[in-house]
Image (cartoon, helix red, strand yellow):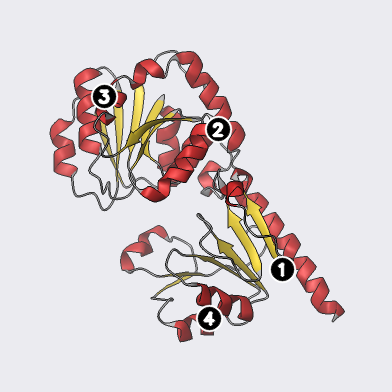
Amino acid sequence: EDKGAIPKMIINGDETVVGFLKDINFSVFDWLNEEGETFDIINGADMVIIDSYLADLSFYKKISDRVKMPVYVDDNKRFKYPRGIVINGNIHAKEFDYPKEENINYLLGTRYIPLRKEFWDVSKRDVKENIENVIITFGSDDGKDMTPGVLKLLAENYPAITKNVVVGRDFQNVEAIKKVSDNKTNLIYYPDAEQMRDIMRKADIAISAGGQTLYELARVGVPTAVVAVAENQLNNIEGCKKAGFIEYIGRYNDKDLFENIGNLLERLYYKKRKTIDQIGRRFVDGQGARRVVKELLTQYVKLSGKDDEK
């Protein structure tokens, strides 16, 4: 939009997503199984960006055949993609050894991680000598029921520390969380991107699952202890661990997980937190979305020039 384009989002979901789509031109329907309606909308589009774990290769090929510039958001090298541009902003993206093809361009690594707009321009914050504030965040549903156990451990062992607990819309364990809360616990329900950024800026450390939130935490410079709650998070976690801006404390079902959390504050001493802050902000500078848009527009102009020459 900042560059004058008129984007439209097509979302496979239900009406609960509408609240997240303020001031956005969108349609909500099963675009994967209602291909006729999908292609009626996208036929003639200059560019289509597709982000899906469910669409098969034949669907991607249909997109590639119909659109001047198809763009594919990828996490784990799902396919050998057809003609277009592949974006994988994860830290481990370059390790996938994507095939080199003349008609495919790749935007790989954290230089191209498209964070939410609220995280693009974040000023540096001071790293406090003592840990006074912790954020606990386990996604939109906390499907592995991590939050109550983590909060209970912190409340029992670190009663003086403020615990900001992010509660997602699909949490089924809110009552269990309330039961183990102490008078230094704040439950923060369904925060938007601006609220999430502000909560992170106050945090001295975070305890988090291993998804995309790690890149927002790195952008703000929050030293983060990470619990793997799904297999598809392990590559991401390993890359962040190698880079040095997270502490990996184990999988959700590791028998010594809570022991690792218990000694976390001793492991994340002041100098280490300062170092992690610097590394995280260096790897994730918040400009990924701008770089992606600039590259897409550059490639589109090149394609248009080639078409004019025909």
Q: Of callouts 3 and 4, which one flags the residue occurring earlier in the amino acid sequence?
A: 4
Helix, strand or loop at label 1? It is loop
Q: What amino acid type should be assigned to the residue bearing mark 4?
A: Ile
Residue at 72%, 68% (x, y): give it: 103
Which of marks 4 and 1 precedes in the sequence? 4
Quadrant for residue 177, please give it.
top left
Q: CA distance from mark 3 to mark 4?
A: 53 Å
The residue where tag 4 is placed is 41
Please state which amino acid type lies under the numbered disc 1.
Answer: Asn
Q: Which residue is mark 2?
A: 243
Query: Measuring 62% from the left and 57% from the top, which residue is drawn there?
Result: 98
N-terminal-most mark, 4 or 2: 4
Does residue 184 appear to the left or right of 90 in the view shown?
left
Res. 259 mark: 3
- Name the mark on residue 103: 1
Name which residue lies at 36% across and 63% down. 17
Q: Is there CB contact under 8 Å for labels 2 and 3?
A: no
Classify 111 as above or below 20.
above
